Image: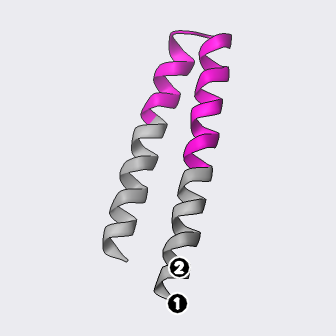
Amino acid sequence: MSLVYWGIVTGLVLMVVTLFVSFALIGSKARPSDASRQSLEELKEHIARASSGRRAA
């Protein structure tokens, strides 16, 4: 059961991180300075949230 849970959690985290990275790349092409900085900050926050959530669970 726990192995299935970790597989699902890892898959979801990887999917969301991939989405964030793709949006960051699209944003940096549109507006290099502001969009990439903002999306990078969001990506860092999301990674921090995901890893702390994984540690808590």
Question: On the image, numbered disc 1 is attached to which residue?
Answer: 1
Q: Report the residue at 67% width, 22% height from top.
A: 26
In front of the other: 44 or 9 = 9
Name the residue type under label 1: Met
Instruction: Look at the numbered discs 2 and 1 and tell me whether their residues touch, using CB distance below 8 Å.
Output: yes
Where residue 28 sits, quadrant-wise, is: top right
**What is the crowding at mark 2: few (fewer than 14 residues within 10 Å), some, or many (at least 20)?**
few
In the image, residue 25 sits, relative to residue 44, either above or below, namely above
User: Where residue 37 sits: x, y (%)?
Assistant: 46, 21
Where residue 54 sits, quadrant-wise, is: bottom left
In front of the other: 33 or 1 = 1
In the image, residue 14 sits, relative to residue 56, either above or below, namely above
The magenta segment is 16-41
Is disc 1 placed on a helix, strand or loop?
loop
- The secondary structure making up most of the magenta span is helix
Does residue 46 appear to the left or right of 52 in the view shown?
right
In the image, residue 53 sits, relative to residue 24, either above or below, namely below
Question: On the image, numbered disc 2 is attached to which residue?
Answer: 5
In the image, residue 32 sits, relative to residue 8, either above or below, namely above
**Residue 29 lies within the magenta run:** yes
Find the residue positioned furthest to the bottom: 1
Name the residue type under label 2: Tyr
User: Where residue 14 sits: x, y (%)?
Assistant: 55, 52
Does residue 34 appear to the left or right of 44 in the view shown?
right
Image quadrant where one finds the C terminus: bottom left
User: Where residue 2 sits: x, y (%)?
Assistant: 47, 85
Distance between mark 2 and mark 1 Cα atoms: 6 Å
Is disc 2 placed on a helix, strand or loop?
helix
Where residue 12 sits, quadrant-wise, is: bottom right
In front of the other: 9 or 53 = 9
Q: Report the residue at 62% width, 10% height from top.
A: 31
